[in-house]
Amino acid sequence: MSLNLQYITNVKGETTAIQIPIDDWNAIQKQLAILKKRNSIKADIKATLKEVESYKDRKSKLISLKDFINEL
């Protein structure tokens, strides 16, 4: 993605702000939402794998499918 940024400077020539077109901003926000969802899914998968490992090691008690559905 190529951004059309505009730099705002003060009288000393120091950059004090950057303007970004709204379409670019909306595209960035959309990508950020996708990344957040992906990270959430990854965290859920990691937690699930950890839970499966604890079942394998018999550190946790298995529940029936009926009990699982009732928890939902």
Image: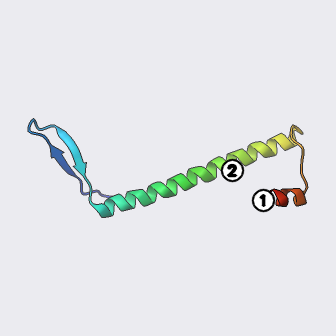
Left or right: where 68 falls relative to 34: right
Residue closest to the eye, 66 or 30: 66
Q: Quadrant of the N terminus?
A: bottom left
Whole-percent x, y for residue 58 in the image: 89, 39
Q: Residue at x 57, y 50 (%)?
A: 39
- Amino acid type, callout 1: Leu
- Furthest toward the top, the residue is 12
The quarter holding residue 11 reads top left
Left or right: where 69 falls relative to 29: right
Q: Quadrant of the C terminus?
A: bottom right
- Give the class, few, some or many, for how many residues have Cα within 10 Å of label 2's Cα (few <14, many ≥20): few
Give the number of the mark in front: 1 or 2: 1
Per the image, the residue denoted by label 2 is 45
The secondary structure type at the circle numbered 2 is helix
Label 1 to label 2: alpha-carbon separation: 18 Å
Task: Indicate which disc residue 72 carries.
Answer: 1
Q: Residue at x 19, y 48 (%)?
A: 7
Whole-percent x, y for residue 42 in the image: 62, 50
